[in-house]
Image (cartoon, rainbow, N blue to C red):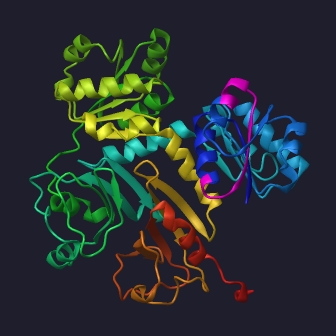
Amino acid sequence: MKVIIIGAGVVGYTIAKKLSSEAKDVVLIEKDEKRIREVAEGLDVKIIHGSGSSPKVLMDAGVEHSDMVIAVTDSDEVNMIACLIAGSQSRVPKKIARIREPDYASYTQIFEKDYLDLDFNINPEKAAAERILKIIEVPGAVDVAEFADGSVKLIGMRLTATCGIVGQKLKDLKELHPDHKVIIVAIYRDSETIIPNGSTVLEEGDLVFTVTVPAEIPNLIKLLGRKEKTGSKVMLVGGGEIGFYLAQWLEKKGFSVKVIERNEQRAGFIADRLKKAIVIKGDGTDQNLLIEENVRDIDTFISVTNDEEANILTALLAKRMGAGRCMALIDKPEYLSMVSTVGIDVGVSPRLASVSGILQFVRRGKILAVTQLMEERVEAIETIAMETSDIASKPLKELKFPQGALIGAVVRGKNEVIIPEGKTLIQPGDKVIIFALPKAVPKIEKMLMVKAEYF
């Protein structure tokens, strides 16, 4: 597969690194010479200096032979023009663009086949905000993802010393709770990522990722020994696009919201557009301000400014002052990996949210969604079982599933969610949610593909 990526910012660099590590043919276009020198040290890909909206640059990059064009510069207009020119010069099978401006995003007609003909529109900030909203709704969760139109939930929670299942094997857990639609699909322990089996023993401090159905979430919370409540009081630091989007949604859901924004003009802008939220002009790292606004009584504290160092500092400060669950918007991998060790409950990355969306179009097979978990240590793939793929029409215990991967749920028809066992038989047309370590993904892709003899 040949992929042209336009823009070597955080998102473009991450995508290029991910795809090149999977032996994809990647060409990266960037107009900033300084940035080219920086990324060239960490990437083994072809880099072209120039604008991705230039027909000549796109031709030099080999657009006529490309399978995908991904435009992720900081300019919506450049991204749209790049995809438009790519489509006019050559029939590119897949075109993806980052478009952040709400006015463009709401005018969806321009993305359709007769115009830009985009296959996917990336809005990293909105994707990160939606991830935060899902986490807020589940008490004690550090990560939440949805599959099969919300009929399957993936919930990440950390096991504490008081959790009754610590020290138990997973097979014993299933025997003790046979009626619960719950399966643990991944464990993050110290620096090790584990795709578990029946003999895996749960330990204090494990970050466990569990697949369940929405109705089972209260039982899951009890099972994992969590006692937190969602609570209605939320404090947001940062009134940018993410903060404003979150505040609007939380208001509609009946939460009591406070927003701290240091820019007076922006604070006035969002205050005029929010109905019940309290908007405060100030610095979220100001300890006196947090005391004045009773941060110790806040159930959920979220720092979403454009400065990730400030987000970490603010969330950590709020946690130490008595706030409940504390979240920070973070993009640098080295910062994300240290979140739990410094005492912050949740780190959310717009960069990883973007990569997840793009991988849906990279993976082979009939893929519905891809979600990156634990800073890209685990990949969740939602797919449809094809008639002649290796996963269909066989009991799971007979499948030669690669080490480092497992099936977390099977969705049949509109409503039937199956937590799989060895005897479970996947039928053609079933939605299947698979969890895999990166090393197992190529083998999973091979199993999902329709065999040549089918044609």
How far from the left and from the top, in percent, is residue 411? 44, 74
Residue 150 position in % (x across, y down):
42, 60
Q: Indicate whether 243 appears above or below 436.
A: above
Left or right: 38 in relation to 309: right
Residue 330 seen by the camera: yes
Q: Quadrant of residue 359?
A: bottom right
Instruction: From the viewer's side, name the closer residue of 418 and 159.
Output: 159
Vertical order, 411 against 230 (above or below): below
Q: Tell me if residue 345 can be seen.
A: no
Numbered circles on residues, count: 0
Q: Quadrant of residue 378?
A: bottom left
Q: Magenta segment, which residues?
A: 21-37
Outermost residue toward the front in this view: 41
Q: Position of residue 254 (x, y in %)?
A: 31, 38
Residue lying at 66% horizontally and 50% vertically, measured from the top left = 120
* Quadrant in which the C terminus appears: bottom right
Q: Is residue 401 left or right of residue 367?
A: left
Residue at x 28%, y 64% (from the top left corner): 215
Q: Is residue 208 left or right of residue 408?
A: left
> Which percent across, then down, holds residue 158?
23, 51
Query: Which residue is pictured at 55% across the width and 80% down the height?
Result: 429
437 relative to 5, above or below? below
Tell me what residue is drawn at x 19 percent, y 16 percent.
Answer: 291
Magenta includes 286? no
Residue 24 magenta-highlighted: yes
Q: Quadrant of the N terminus?
A: bottom right
